[in-house]
Image (cartoon, grey):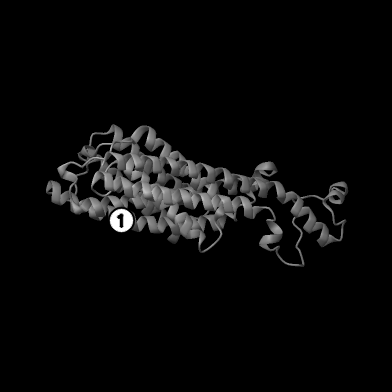
Amino acid sequence: MGDIGQISLYLVTAAMTAYLVATIAFATDFSRLAADRPARTKERRLATVGAPSSVEDAVSADVPVDTEVPDPRGPATEAEQLPQRRKAAGIGMSTFTVATLLLLAGVVTRGVAAGRVPWANMYEFTMVSVLVASALFLGLNRRRDLRFLGTFIALFAVAAITLALVELYTDPNAVQPALQSYWLVIHVSIAASSMGVFGTAAVVSGLQLAKDRAVTKGGAQRRILAQLPPAIDLERLAFRINAVGFVLWTFVLITGAIWAEHSWGRYWGWDAKETWSFIIWVVYAAYLHARATRGWEGRRAAWFSVAGFISILVNYYVVNLFVNSLHSYAGV
């Protein structure tokens, strides 16, 4: 099985490289939008107010770019707004899809090499979480154009995989007897999926905060982030994704309690890992409740979403690596 384990490592490394290429392609697309926007805006406003039709004439006429003028022709089409976008964005989506398939192959071959499900330690857990986040991004793009997220989701994948390869990698081996349970299949797979979902929502919330701040700043920052949807749309998208993640995390707590009763004879014992898992649940429950019933929208909701994912990272890295816990036997 050693050869298969090495193949898995090669596939994961290739996936990381493809994610990096996707990051560059999406970033190129994003920067082009920012660079093209002033010219596009001037051309459309000049046509609206009857000023000279060329960009050169607009510059000489000193037409302000940031002045919003309604266009009687209606909103520009995608082709009018983004004449150079398709190529860079298409490369980004293609390489991102290839990266996701390579990572899927790496996860599957890892399971074959280990002779078990491939999410029994932190390295494997990270791979599955990134795979879920990638699949979620690709799935969402089938319903609406969310390629503006590509730079940040791909960069998140590169960072997570690099950290896993450098600090968390272990050879594919059988797990300890305590983990040889069908609950490993159920409980840990849901936990890894939850982390991927919450990570995607945190990226959206981070962009919402940046967009909201850019509205009041102006200048280059505003021009760059103007390519993002309105902050309210980003906040609604993050809320929907977090709602799915919360349902998954609720099942994490339930299945974890059942597994604990089977292994240790009690459902709950306030172990460090259990305590932090409950804290995460409380944070997201408070976020969803405040958002749905108290009208907590905008920046407050976004900060809540980011805080929830930070608590997940603390649970995953700090508690797993530095705190003595009954869950420590799982190793890195």
Can residue 327 be seen here? The reply is yes
Picture mark count? 1
Number of residues whose C-alpha sits closer than 10 Å to that of mark 1, classed few (under 14), some (14–19) or many (20 or more) = some
Query: Looking at this view, is 49 or 110 the one in front?
Result: 110
Please state, as top left, top right, bottom left or bottom right, where the C terminus lies in the image.
Answer: top left
Q: Position of residue 78 (x, y in %)?
A: 66, 61
Residue 47 position (above or below residue 58): below
Q: Residue at x 84, y 60 (%)?
A: 49
Relative image position of residue 245 (x, y in whole percent): 38, 55
* Residue 275, quarter of picture: top left
User: Residue drawn at (20%, 54%), measured in percent from left and top?
Assistant: 182
Q: Residue furthest bottom?
A: 73
Residue positioned most to the left: 265
- Residue identifier under label 1: 250
Give the position of the N terminus as an image quadrant: top left
Q: Residue at x 30, y 56 (%)?
A: 250
**Residue nearest the observer in this picture, 98 or 290:** 98
94 vs 67, left or right, is: left
The relative height of residue 178 versus residue 93 in the rendered view (above or below) is above
Q: Say if residue 294 shows up in the picture.
A: no
Q: Please provide percent x and percent y for residue 161.
A: 41, 40
In this orientation, which residue lies closer to the viewer: 281 or 88?
A: 88
Question: From the viewer's perspective, is 297 left or right of 307?
Answer: right
Kindly identify the amino acid type of the residue bearing the numbered disc 1: Thr
